[in-house]
Image (spheres, helix red, strand yellow):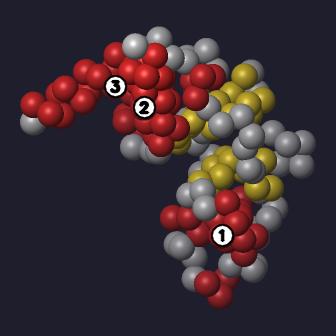
Amino acid sequence: MELNRKIRRLLNAQLRDMTVEDIMAPEVVTINEDASLEQLYSLISEYHHVGYPVVNKENKVTGVISYKDLFRVTRDDWGSTHVKERMSTRLVCVSPGDGVIVAVEKMTEEGIGRLLVMEDDTLVGVVSRSSIMDGAVKRLLTQRCGQ
């Protein structure tokens, strides 16, 4: 228990002044809402992400879909089922200037592992729990090596 507290304090110290923009992935793989679940499976196989923003013909984000959504449909129906039929339309977002701690709190409250990073109505990135951990560890290592 004491170790967890120490790790939590260390991470908070590393994340305190970091923004979402510092650690987000700016190149986001998206899927069109009219794509089939078979196409979603191909994306998952290629990129190994567990969730994808869904966009419409105007390239505006309309939802998110995950591998869990895919596997709630029988394999035989993947070719005939469209992403828009299975996606969640509830978007949980942060802005590039938001603090990383705000992002962590939002993920924890929502029980999710990634957030869309939006500037106005434009998708500019994705931030995940793993990118937050990577950012904290890199900063810690940089500080330790620089001393």
Q: Which residue is mark 2?
A: 137
Q: Residue at x 71, y 34 (%)?
A: 26
Please tell me whether mark 1 or mark 3 is closer to you in this view: 3
Task: Indicate whether 72 appears above or below 126.
Answer: below
User: Around disc 3, counting alpha carbons within 10 Å, would you say few (fewer than 14), some (14 to 19), or many (20 or more)?
Assistant: some
Give the alpha-carbon distance from disc 1 to disc 3, as whole Å: 32 Å
Q: Which residue is mark 1?
A: 45
Q: SS of the residue at dot 2?
A: helix
- Residue 80's spot in the image, x, y percent? 75, 79
Task: Indicate whether 127 appears above or below 47.
Answer: above
Amino acid residing under circle 2? Val
Q: Which residue is mark 3?
A: 11
What is the quadrant of residue 69 in the picture?
bottom right
What is the quadrant of residue 94 in the picture?
top right
- Residue 131's spot in the image, x, y percent? 52, 38
Amino acid residing under circle 1? Ser
- Residue 124's spot in the image, x, y percent? 73, 31
Give the alpha-carbon distance from disc 1 to disc 2, as whole Å: 28 Å
Instruction: Tell me if label 1 and label 2 are in contact, CB under 8 Å.
Output: no
Task: Indicate whether 111 appears above or below 49.
Answer: above
Task: Indicate whether 72 appears above or below 29.
Answer: below
Give the alpha-carbon distance from disc 3 to disc 2, as whole Å: 8 Å
**Is residue 81 in sight in this rendering?**
no
- Residue 93's spot in the image, x, y percent? 59, 31
Q: Residue at x 67, y 82 (%)?
A: 77
Please indicate whether residue 84 sits to the left or right of residue 140 in the image: right
Q: SS of the residue at dot 3?
A: helix
**Which mark is first along the chain, 3 or 1?**
3
**Is residue 127 in sight in this rendering?**
yes
